[in-house]
Amino acid sequence: MNKKNIYQKLHDACLSATSVKKGAKVNGMHFRPLQHDDVQEVATQALLDNGLYATCNYLTEIVPNIKKVMVVCTMRVYDVDNPTQHILVDGCSSFGDISMFGTGQAMSYSRKYAFLNLLNLKTGITDEDGYEKKPYEQDSTEQSVEEPTYMDDTIDVEEMKRALKSTNNLDEFLEVKNLIRKDVEFLMRNNLRAYRQVTDVAETRELQLTNGQ
């Protein structure tokens, strides 16, 4: 019997990984956060079940002009049966406050996104957004209508998109755009994929409103 290579194992891990349930709402937050520990638990179990093991290295740098520490996570996923083989997940980063907890929080945030990117983990809660949690189906013919929204612990990207789409005129659009400006700037520095999702919606809606649609 032929042994599976590391990419076949990663493919199986992606198919078998369960969805990550978002955490409970807390005071001051209008959406459910996606917790690092929950992402790590789902991802690590899927990897271990398929003979894979992940390690992380972190590069930290103080960014004086914004008074933040930037942490870049480099994740390596090793084939337990053949440790000379590994897959690299590079470039997942986050900013943290310059405090006794800031670096650790940024490390957790960047590690969380490395796991999400590695296994393309599904996230959602049925009673919050209608998404029924289930693992990927092998040989599924279902096609995505649009790229999934990338969430984090501080910004609700889906809510930002809904707010932009629901504007009825250019004045409302500009008001919403100004309200979310700082969050969009945060995404630009920390999560380019989510940033592009929001800006694509904004550009489309602005063009529609300009044309009287």
Image: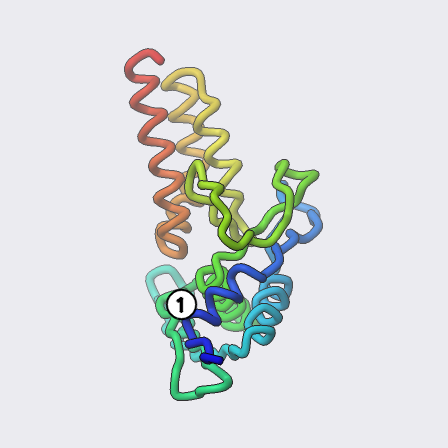
Q: Nearer the viewer, residue 72 or 123?
A: 123
Q: Residue at x 51, y 62 (%)?
A: 14
Classify the position of the C terminus by image quarter. top left
Q: Is residue 115 above or below residue 74?
A: above
Q: Is residue 57 above or below residue 212?
A: below
Where disc 1 sits, the SS reads strand
Taking the image as shown, residue 27 lies to the left or right of residue 114, namely right
The picture places residue 9, in percent across and down from the top left corner, at 48, 71
Q: How many marks?
A: 1
Q: Nearer the viewer, residue 11 or 2?
A: 2
Taking the image as shown, residue 113 lies to the left or right of residue 27, namely left
The picture places residue 199, in percent across and down from the top left corner, at 35, 38
Q: Residue at x 53, y 55 (%)?
A: 138
Q: Residue at x 49, y 68 (%)?
A: 111
Identify the residue position indicated by label 1 in the image: 70
The picture places residue 75, in percent across and down from the top left corner, at 43, 74
Q: Quadrant of residue 34?
A: bottom right
Q: Residue at x 48, y 57 (%)?
A: 120
Q: Is residue 186 above or below residue 111?
A: above
Residue 98 visible in rendering: no
Q: Nearer the viewer, residue 149 or 17?
A: 17
The picture places residue 164, in percent across and down from the top left corner, at 44, 29
Residue 207 visible in rendering: yes
Amino acid under disc 1: Met
Q: Nearer the viewer, residue 141 or 40?
A: 141
